[in-house]
Structure formats: C-alpha cells, structure tokens
Image (cartoon, coloured by chain):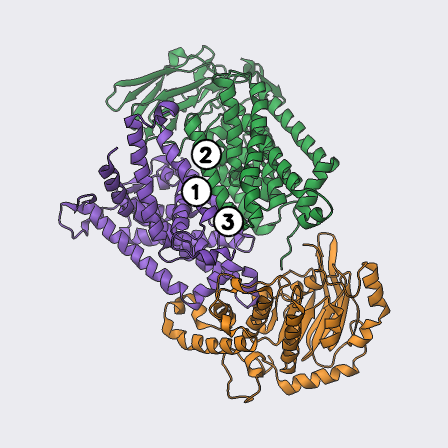
Amino acid sequence: MDLIEILSFAFRSAVGPLAITFALAAIGLNIHYGYTGLLNIGQVAFVMVGAYGLAITVDVFGGSHVLGALVGLGLAALLAVLLAVPTLRLRADYLAITTISVGEVLRLATRSSQAAPLTRGADGIAGLGGPFYALNPIPPGDYGFWIFQLGSERRVWLMLVGWGLIALMCLLVWALMRSPWGRVLRAIREDEEAARSLGKNVFSYKMQALVLGGVIGGLAGVYYAIQAAGVAPDTFDPRITFYAYVILILGGPGRVLGPVLGALIFYALFQGADVLLRQGAAGGWLPLVEWFGSQAIGATRLALVGLVLMLLMIFRPQGILGDRREMSLGA
Amino acid sequence: MAPDTRPHVPATEEQGSEPSDLVAGEDLALARRARAQLAEVAPEPGVPKPDPLLVADGVRKSFGGLVAVDTRHLEIQRGTITALIGPNGAGKTTLFNVLTGFDRRSEGTWQFADQDISRMAPHRVAQRGMVRTFQMTKALTRMTVMENMRLAATGQTGEHLLSALLPGTWRAQERENTERAQALLERFDLAAKADQFAGELSGGQRKLLEMARALMVRPRMIMLDEPMAGVNPALTQTLLGHVTDLRDEGLSVVFVEHDMDVVMGISDWVVCLAEGQVIAEGPPEAISDNRAVIDAYLGARQDLDEHGPEGVR
Amino acid sequence: MSATAAGGRLVAVTLVVALAAGGLAALGALAAPALAEGEESLRGTLQVDGDPVEGVRIEVTDDAGATVAEETSDADGQVEIALPGPGSYDATLDVDTLPDDVVLRDPDRATISPDVSPGATRPLAFPLQDADTEEEVVSAIPWSRLAQGSVNGIKLGLLIGMASIGLSLVFGTTRLINFAHGEMVTFGAVVAWMLHMTGFELPLIAATLLAIVAGGALGAGMEKGLWHPLRSRKFGIIQMLVVSIGLSFLLRYLIQLVYGTQRQTYADFAISASVSLGPFRTTVRDLLIMGISILVLTGVGLMLTRTRIGKAMRAVADNRDLAESSGINVGRVILIVWVLGGALAALGGVFVGASEEVTWIMGFRLLLLMFAGVILGGIGTAFGALVGSMVVGLGVEISAVWLGGQLKYVWALAVLILVLLVRPQGILGVRERVG
C-alpha cells in the first residue's frame, strides 16, 4: 500500500473540480434541507437543468457561454417553481417523492431519442468550456508540491473560479441566514404551523428557499458542464443527490460552511477509499474483484457511503460543525 | 379597518405608563365598555353581542362523512375572556383551526373586526390580529427564546429576500423589536432565558413563551388552545394572571379549557360546544347549571372536571 | 408461426428492442445500465409478434471496417454483443440467417450504426415481420399495440400494486416513507435468481418461495434492527427518511456487489407459449403472473378486512394511540407489516424479473412507479394504492404506444404531479387534518 499515493490523490480530489461541483450542489441543498427543512431528494435535477441549459444554449442555439449559464440558472429557478406549486403546500414527504421522481425522469427524458434534437440523446453534448479557458490568466505549467498536487494551469484556473464561486455562495448564505429572512426559514424548519400562526407566509418562503437553493444547484451544473467540457445524461443519476446529502450531513446541515467542509472530507475519503480498495485488490489482500467481479470496488465504495449516511444520520445528524446540544433538542 | 391597528411602530409615548402598548392593539376604553355591555346579553346559543369582534355564521367543517363543527351563529364580544368548553371531540380545536384558517372550512363565513376573513390563509389571519396558540406547544426548539420572540414581530423589512441582504434597511427595526421582546420576556419571567434554546425550556415555560410570542404579533384577539394543559398548579395561577391582565389591557381572549374551576374563575363568557354545535352560551354562572351542558358532558361520559386532552390524536 | 394464422388481421409487427414500446421489454428495458460502470455492449431481442427468432447472426464492425464481434440470437431471440470499448460501430444483421418466413420490415435497415458511449449498452433494433404480412397500413390509432399495451399495463399495474402494499402499510402504521422499499423488490428477484441459476439450481418455484421467506426476513430484520430502535429513540420522520435513503443505497450497492451489473433472466419460464384472447396477446407465463398477483392481492384484501391481524393493522394505521390503548400490540402489528411487506416485495421482484429481467437497479425504477401509484391512490390506504397502481401501470404501458418506451416514466411523473395539484389525498384518501 502506497500511503503517499493515497494522500496525494485524496488531496487532489478534495480540492478538485468535482468536489467543487458537489460543494455547490450541497450549498443549495443546505438552504433546502439544512435551513428550511425541505426534503429535496432531487438536487440532481437542478444540477442537470443548469448543465443542460448551458450545453443546449451553446450547442443547439449557438449562444455564448455567458448566456448559456444564465439560461441554466433560469431553468433551475423555473424547475423550482414548477416543483413548488404542487408540493410545498403538502406534507414534507410529498416533496421528497416528487423530487426523486423528477430527477430520474428528467434523465430518462433527456437521453430519449425524442429529445435527441435538443439534447443529443444518450451521448450528450460535448465541446463546451472553450471560452472559459480562453480567459485563463495562469501561465502554463504544473502546479503544486509534494503531496499537494493541483495539476495543470487549466485545472488551477477551474479550481480558482470554483472556489471563488463557493466563497461567494457561502457569503450569500451567511448574509441571508443572519437576517430576519433566514430566521423565518429556520422557524419553518422547526415548525411551519407555528410560523404560520405568527403571520409568516410559509408557502412563499419555502418557494423562495427552493428557488434559491435550486439556482445554486443549477450553478453547480453550469460549473460541472464547463469542467467536464460537456454533458451526458447518465452522469446525472440519483447518486449525485445522495452524495450531496452525505456531504451536507457530514459537514453540518444548517451551517454556512457545513457543505464546504463536508465536500472536502467526503471527496478525500471517497477517492482515498477508491485508491485503497484498488490497491487492496491489486495487492491481493482484499480479493473483492476475485470474489465478486469487476464492479466490486465501485459497489463496495457506494455501499459504504450508504452506510456512512445512515450512521451519520443516526449518531451525528448535526455533522461536524453542528452543536450536539442543539440537535438533542429534537426537531 | 378600525383605527386601532398599529403596525410595527412602537408607540412608546402613547398611553404613558399603561403597559397595553406592549401587547394590545385595542382601544382600552372601548374594550372596557364592551366588557361591561356583556352583562345585558341573554344567555342563549347564537345570541348577538353589542360589540362583537368576531362574528361567525354557519361555520361547518366535515372530515369525510364526519361533521366536526356545525355552528349556526357565534359572536365573540370585544375585550372579554371567552371560554370554549365541551366534551372530548366536541370540535373545539377544529373550530379554532377553521376560524384561524388552519383547516379549510366546508361552509360558512366569519368576520373579524368587520372584515370577512373566512377565505383567508392562516398567516394573513394572524397578520390581521387574530393569533392562536396550539394545544401542543410549538416552541421553535432550535432557536433561542429571543429569536422566537423577534420572529413573531410583524411587518419586518428584513424578512424580504432583497432587503435581507442590506442590513442597513432592517437593523433599526430589529433593535426596536428586540426591546419590545425584552420587555415582554421580563413580564413573562423569561428574560433570564432569552439566550437559551427554546427547546431547553420546561413545559410551563414554553407555554409562557408561546403566549409572549403571540403578543409580539400585536394581536387584537388571542386564541389559546388549552393554555393550562399539563401545567403545574402554581404556574396555572401565573398563566391565569397573565390572561386576565391581557384582557384588562384591552385584548380579547378566547380559550379552550377543560378545567371547570379555571373556566369559572376567569371567563366573562362561556360557550359550550357538543358534537360541533353551540349548545349553550352565557356568563359562567349561567352555564354551570345549564341542563344542556350537563347532559352533553354526561352523554359523553365525562365529568365536568375532566382534565384529559381533547380527543385522541 | 401462430401469428400468421391470425390471418387477415393486420398486426403491427414490431420487433421490440431494448428500448421500444410494449412487449416483453416493458420494465427491464428501461433499466438500461445507466449507472453501470461496466463494459460497453449492444443488446436486443429478435422477435416477430412476440415469438423469439433464434439463430440470427449479427456482425459488428468498427470505424475501420474490421469485424470486432459476432453473435447469434439465442432461443429467446436475445443477442448481447460485448464491445471492445466506446465508439461508433456498424451492426449488420445477416439476412441469410433469418428463418424463411421472417423478413426485415425495412430491407434497407439490415445495418444500423450505434454510437456507444463509455459504459453504455445500446439497443440493437432490427424490426422483423412475417414474410407474408401485407405492407402495413399505418392507422392513426394502433389498435393492436394498444391492446398489447393494455395487457402489459394490467400486468405492470398488478405488479406495482403487489409490490407497493408493503410501502403503503408501513407508511400507514409508522408514517415512514421507506425509500429502501425498491431494494426489497430487487432483493427478492436476486435471491431467487441465485437460488435458481447458481449453485443450488432450484426450480424457479422453489426459489421463489425461498425468496419470499428471505424477503419477509429482510423486512423483519430492518424493523427489528433499525426502525424499531429509531422509533423508540423518538427519531423524527425526516431523519428516518434520510436514514432510509442511506439504507437504500447500502442495499442497492450490496446487491450490485454480490449480483453484479448484468441483466439476467430466469431459465424456467424464459420461453412461454403465446396465447391469444381476441385482440389481446399474452403468454402463459404472464397469465400465470397476473393470476397469482390477483390471488395474492385478493388474499391481502381479505386479510385486511376479515382477520384480526388485518383489522389490527388498519386500526394502527387509523389511530395509533387509540389502537394501543385498546389493547393492540402495536409493535407486533408493525413487525408483521414489515414481514408481509418484505415478502410481497420479494414476490413482486421475482415476477418483474421473470417477465423482464433481473438487474440490480430494477427495484429503484419500480419504486418511482410505486410512489406514483401510492400517491395517486391515496397514501396509506391499501385499496387506494391498488387502484392507483393499476392506473399507473396501464398509463405507463399505453402511453408507451405513442411515446415509446423511453418516455413512459414521464407519464407516471405527470400523473403524480397532476394528482398532487388536484387531489393530494389521492383517489381514495381522506384529507388530513392539521393543528
């Protein structure tokens, strides 16, 4: 087992573009679940419309990347409104059921041949991100030292912008959540009937929260499309929402920096576990592949993530940044 | 609109030492006169009142085939304490829910301060000045006592998404609300707990908080759903004191209660529901030996002193 | 071929491929290995009128024209061709290997050119028809496919209904929406597959019975080991819901670990004689599945209305506190609900596996349909859930006639949202009270 390789890879992953994408998606989810108590199990849908909004604008309609990004964010907001109207007046689990279905159905619809003129079906849309890299001010080269390797100038540029976006979003969440507006959201999370009895328009606030968190999810999608230089429907599977939840609950729901810390740790562990499992398989001390076949490593890793989510939710639902005292009060 | 609704502007100068500016939006003299007028009202179901704040007509609520509430006519006099009694399952809480917009009515209309509110969403009913509490206290457990209080203030600029980002637009208002909240907390003996989580309070303290919080809305009518349930006798006396104080400051109070001693002790008027209908109303003395009331309780095999919770949920 | 005997009736003869409408492809078809991180492949079923066509050779060449693979359809008409990697390929059907009475519907389409992305399985679509079928007159309303869609829809509806009883009863008695319920379906299908196809080689019927027992045990284990302790620790509904999401991923990937990403069928009943009832065409196997499902559903209905335990379940669902105070052992009732739900989910899984395929993701896909059905019918009401499931099943299959198999889930979602807008309590549900 090569510890340096694992550490280096874990670091690279923790600060890399995918972790950034998930941190953004989880910041959006934090507004939904962490602050308002909205059980959105389809954050992937917002990420997906963000990404496809950009991709289709650029690919099919020949628009600029900036316009595409705006379209992506706009579509995410629209999706939030469409989801809000039928579900937000009902009990929390209706939103859960609807969002999980929307996430999966959007993916299936996007990859269908009927949608292919717009979405290019299952193969997706490639060739995005050119104008983004054209703006790159960073001189060519490989950056990083020892186990802290960042990669090429393109990757550094991506990460710079990504972490900038994260900082901006955290600032936004911080500013909002210390205001009376954020106080109403937290009150809704605690008990929406009570908020209503005190004259708060709960539906309107839930809608605002769903839209805001959805748009941040859409931003994650725009960023994802650029970092992957394209989109394909099957990347947007239910695992994305699931990771976002693990990240959020790991870091601390209802905490400004919870999703960021969660993403760092999750990606370091998740990718570290991958290297570890693969080294174990190669070294013969963990004969998963021999026993179960080639899917074994991926499957083991995901099953472990499921277990982690359960254990976190049961034993430390307040996450790393949360306050045990606060959580023990019960929701 | 009556001239006495004062939106979120603290009126510290008016009425000088009277604490009523802290809680009430009502004209004190008017309210006192209204209470005195009640003496001349006949104790009959559905009787009109001289100065009603709430007038309900034909309010009906059914769940599936089950009719939970079916009141022909009901008026609540301004400035009084009105008790709502009745055996378990009589529809008291449902009537609360319907009147405050929490349950959708099946039929009926009702006016609050001469305005039709029968189709109004619950939050708008509250904003109009009719604020209710819940049988099971709904303290916002993971928010501090002070946050609970501040939340309840109405007309907050900072509750709009865009102004929320500009603290300059809401800081001053927040300060005023905090001051008023502090005063209310002192009055309800909760000032020492201001920075604790509401979830850390005892059951009785939560009842107090819920009442104080409702007052932050500046209601004209406060509707208390079993405010004394599960509270120790000493605190019951304190709560009763608060309720009568509120009335004396001009607020109209409606409350659901099972304890007949409490009902008889503080109510100006008692309304008895059975199977969703108003079967009797009148001053407490008139109700305590009303045949229909006794029958209703016996019919439901309940003692008049029954303390149990309403209905099994 | 029996279809030919049907004579003058013009039957739209569609060879259904992995992603096409109707036919046997129904659910499993959509369970395309979207999430699979496996190898690229091409896959399809060659059939005429529901009858498999065996021994047809398909050759695959790459961009450069070099032959990379070659397969012949098996007794089920299935062809699966593993590819060396992602890319563009040409797949050519060798017309000479077709039986004499079968021709390509479009003679110019003997070669198709799928683009295969990494990890993807692409359909092999070669529409076939009887040689003596007249040129199809395309009518506005494809009656025969509609009839076929209805049969499939009834079957799917029954399967959804049976599998979702547990979901509904668990919700009714504990207020938990169990997102891991889909994995209980997969679990049943996979356990039966393992007992049937590997090692033990039990007959499918025996394997199914054991899978039902295993499903019940899984339900009991989840209740005893997880949900009961959480409930007694006063966990909130939302927290439990998130736990169930974690559990669903844990189970889903444990199943993937053990079972793999492949799509398999049961050997028993893989081929089944086709039966025609007027315009409706089905197979003995599907009739059997539908018959057993109806029996089971009737049995559950009788149990809920006539037996003591059934009445106790309804009492707990109705008003838990009242049930408890009138002497019902609520804990035991909930345990039985889990056992029953797990067993029925497992049986549903085997049936879906038998009529389509067994995959590690099948339960999750079915879960989305179960949600739609349960909400449509009225959440927490067992009979409502059945009605809702039938509507969803029929809707999904009939809409597939027009929308194609790829979009049929869209319909289910549309129904779900429409119901939430118009009548959130469902067809048979009663409005909840608040406050």
Q: Amino acid at mark 3?
A: Gln
Q: Is the residue A38 above or below the residue B283 in the image?
A: above
Q: Which residue is mark 1?
A: A106
Nearest to the eye among marks 1 and 2: give it: 2
| Residue C354 visible, this angle | yes
Kindly identify which chain the residue marked by label 3 belongs to: C
Q: Is the residue B242 above or below the residue C142 in the image?
A: below
Q: Residue C158: percent from the left, percent from the top?
A: 61, 31
Report whether mark 2 lies on the same chain as mark 3: yes
Q: Which chain is purple in the picture?
A: A
x 41%, y 27%: residue: C260
Label located before the other in sequence (2 or 3): 3
What color does chain C have in the rendering?
A: green
Q: Which residue is mark 2?
A: C252
Please state which of residues A123 and C103 is positioned toward the viewer in this rendering: A123
Kindly identify which chain the residue marked by label 2 belongs to: C
Label 2 crowd (10 A; few <14 / some 14-19 / many >=20): many
Q: Which mark is residue C239?
A: 3
Label 3 crowd (10 A; few <14 / some 14-19 / many >=20): some
Label 1 crowd (10 A; few <14 / some 14-19 / many >=20): many
Kindly identify which chain the residue marked by label 1 belongs to: A
Distance of label 2 from label 3 (alpha carbons):
20 Å
Distance of label 1 from label 2 (alpha carbons):
21 Å
